Structures are given as C-alpha cells and as structure tokens.
Image (cartoon, helix red, strand yellow):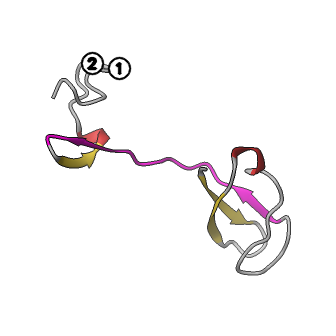
Amino acid sequence: MPVYVYKCLDCGNDFERLRGISSSDSELACPSCGKEGTAKRKLTTFSAMSKMGGVSRPASSYNSSNGGGCCGGSCGCAD
C-alpha cells in the first residue's frame, strides 16, 4: 500500500496516511484539527535506493549519460 501526503485546507496541517489506491481520494479527517473532509491529497515524489556492489545509494546517483532504460544508464548497470 502506498503512503499518501495530505494537506488540511482548514488548518494547513500536512500529514501522511498509508491507504489503498482505491481509497486515496476518499474523505479523511485531519489529525490536527479533526475536521472531516477538508484534507486534499498532495502531489509528491518518491525516493528509490539501489544496491550495487554492496553499497546503497540513491538511484539518481548512477551514471545516466547514456539515456534511459536498463544498461542505458538509469538503472546503474552501465556504471
């Protein structure tokens, strides 16, 4: 299940919830002010970690000069 980030439009509180995809936009009470239905899902990015040679590092730190796709640089196999 993905973690979604929400913002309460009433009090401005940002909070996270682990929810199924089908319920990601259903009404949700703000944990700060308690108001029901004032929270809206925010657009967010995610971070990916990759392990190569026994060392973990962000996937974006691999050589991507050869373009995208596996062995094109973005997956790190051309490193």
Q: Which amino acid does label 2 sit on?
A: Gly
Q: Residue at x 23, y 24 (%)?
A: 65
Q: Where is residue 15 in the image (x, y as percent from the top left)?
A: 62, 68
> Going 83% across and 59% down the picture, which residue do you hit?
27
Picture coordinates of residue 64, whole percent (x, y): 25, 27
Residue 57 horizontal/vertical position (percent): 24, 48
Side (left or right) of 44 relative to 19: left
Tag 1 residue: 69
Q: What element carries label 1?
A: loop
Q: Determine which residue is flagged by label 2.
A: 72
Q: What element carries label 2?
A: loop
Q: Is 21 a magenta residue?
A: no
Q: Quadrant of residue 62?
A: top left
Say left or right for 70 vs 79.
Answer: right
Magenta residue span: 38-53
Q: How crowded is mark 1: few (under 14 residues within 10 Å), some or many (20 or more)?
A: few
Residue drawn at (30%, 29%) of the image: 75
Rendered position, 11 above or below 27: below
Residue shown at 71% from the left, 77% from the top: 31
Q: In terms of depth relative to the viewer, which is nearer, 45 or 4?
A: 4
Disc 2 to disc 1, C-alpha distance: 5 Å
Look at the numbered discs 2 and 1 and tell me whether their residues touch, using CB distance below 8 Å.
yes
The part of the image, by quadrant, that contains residue 21 is top right
Mark 1: which amino acid? Gly
Give the residue at the far bottom of this rendering: 33
Q: Does the magenta stretch include residue 47?
A: yes
